[in-house]
Amino acid sequence: MGKDKLRRFAVVKTFDNFFEPEVGQEFEKKGNWKEFFGNDNPIVLELGCGKGEYSIGLARQYPNKNFIGVDIKGNRMYIGAKEALATGLKNVAFCRTKIDFILDSFGQDEIDEIWLTFSDPQPKKPRKRLTSTLFINRYRQILKKGGLVHLKTDSDLLFESTVDEIKLHNYEPLLITWDLYKDMTDELDEVTKEILHIKTHYEKLFTAKGSIIKYCKFKIN
């Protein structure tokens, strides 16, 4: 790890909107995240949040919801956490943990929505895809009844496997598009359009190379 990454990682640990649960141990805020935010507003997770662009963008769009960006790269989350503090965003936080251990950090029925933004498609490890049955069964434990899962990706492989999972397990599809920006129509309200236009660092890289962005949202019931 380079010196700048080490510096960022050291600094972000001092931020009051950044948390680092102990691996393999139940986190003290599990089931109690609303106490941190100081309200009963819905809680939304972004899993694999990277630099936190989506978490920050959603927090600005929805001041009456709370957002938690989850990733294992603390030096990346430093960017989003710092921006949130600098701009006074109180409805967003960041949690450094592996998504494999998500059940140690969040309680049953504590989460209202999950966002997966440009997740690793795991071409050789389909069970490790964040929309595989393995992970969906974890989400099922922390999502409220009727909670949503959003996927935004450039990967045909990940998107196709997700659509297959939706059909195989009878999840409830609410929107599926293989070409998000082409298929956007007047049927989408302006808030939804603004949300889908939030672009992460990786999305900008992918679209610059000509990649087509796919999006779906569904309920796992």
Image (spheres, rainbow, N blue to C red):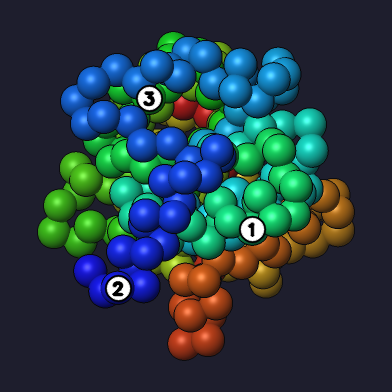
Residue at horizontal 55%, vertical 38%?
16
Q: Return the residue at label 3.
A: 105
Q: Please tell me whether residue 10 is drawn above or below residue 96 in the rendered image.
A: below
Q: Earlier in the sequence, mark 1 or mark 3?
A: 1
For the residues marked 1 and 2, what is the alpha-carbon distance in whole angstroms?
21 Å
Q: Quadrant of the N terminus?
A: bottom left
x then y, percent, for residue 76: 42, 61
Is label 3 in contact with label 2 (beta carbons under 8 Å)?
Answer: no
Q: Return the residue at label 2.
A: 3
For the residues marked 1 and 3, what is the alpha-carbon distance in whole angstroms?
23 Å
Q: Earlier in the sequence, mark 3 or mark 2?
A: 2
Disc nearest the viewer among 3 and 2: 2
Residue at horizontal 30%, vertical 59%?
121
Label 2 environment density (alpha carbons within 10 Å; few <14, some 14–19, many ≥20): few
x then y, percent, for residue 95: 43, 39
Q: Which mark is residue 41?
A: none
Tell me which amino acid carries mark 3.
Ser
| Residue 181: quarter of image | bottom right
Label 1 environment density (alpha carbons within 10 Å; few <14, some 14–19, many ≥20): some
x then y, percent, for residue 11: 44, 55
Query: Is residue 128 shown left or right of residue 41?
Result: left
Q: Please tell me whether residue 18 is drawn above or below residue 220 in the rendered image.
A: below
Q: Return the residue at label 1.
A: 83
Is label 1 in contact with label 3 (beta carbons under 8 Å)?
Answer: no
Question: How many numbered markers are drawn?
Answer: 3
| Residue 145: quarter of image | top right
